[in-house]
Amino acid sequence: MITTNEPETWQQLQEEVARILRECGFAVEVERTLFRMPAAEATWRLPDYMRASPKLGR
């Protein structure tokens, strides 16, 4: 058994997994933000090629 700790939340599980991976020699980052988008640009929009097309009968 790798650990006897039983996490109560997903955050505790995340930290426990990170600890185990560090002990195995991995470089671990928890809760890393990969990129940030300004709020004005955060509105999601369906790409043009996915929109309704008369050719597709939609």
Image (cartoon, rainbow, N blue to C red):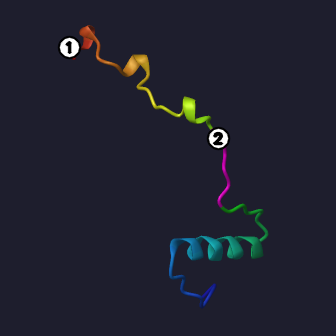
**SS at badge 2:** loop
Q: Is residue 41 above or below residue 35?
A: above
Question: How far is mark 2 from mark 1, CA to CA?
Answer: 37 Å
Image quadrant occupied by the N terminus: bottom right
The quadrant in which residue 27 appears is bottom right
Q: Residues within 10 Å of mark 2 (few under 14, many from 20)?
A: few
Q: Residue at x 29, y 17 (%)?
A: 52
Q: Looking at numbered disc 2 in the image, what kind of residue is underneath it?
A: Arg
Query: Mark 2 sits on what residue?
Result: 36
Query: Mark 1 sits on what residue?
Result: 57
Picture coordinates of residue 49, whole percent (x, y): 40, 17
Marks 2 and 1: CB-CB under 8 Å?
no
| Residue 22 colored in magenta in the image | no
Q: Nearer the viewer, residue 5 or 32?
A: 32
**Region rendered in magenta:** 31-36
Q: Residue at x 44, y 22 (%)?
A: 47
Q: Residue at x 58, y 76 (%)?
A: 12
Q: Magenta-highlighted stretch: main secondary structure? A: loop
Q: Looking at numbered disc 1 in the image, what kind of residue is underneath it?
A: Gly
Picture coordinates of residue 17, whole percent (x, y): 63, 73
Q: Residue at x 48, y 31 (%)?
A: 43
The quadrant in which residue 41 appears is top right
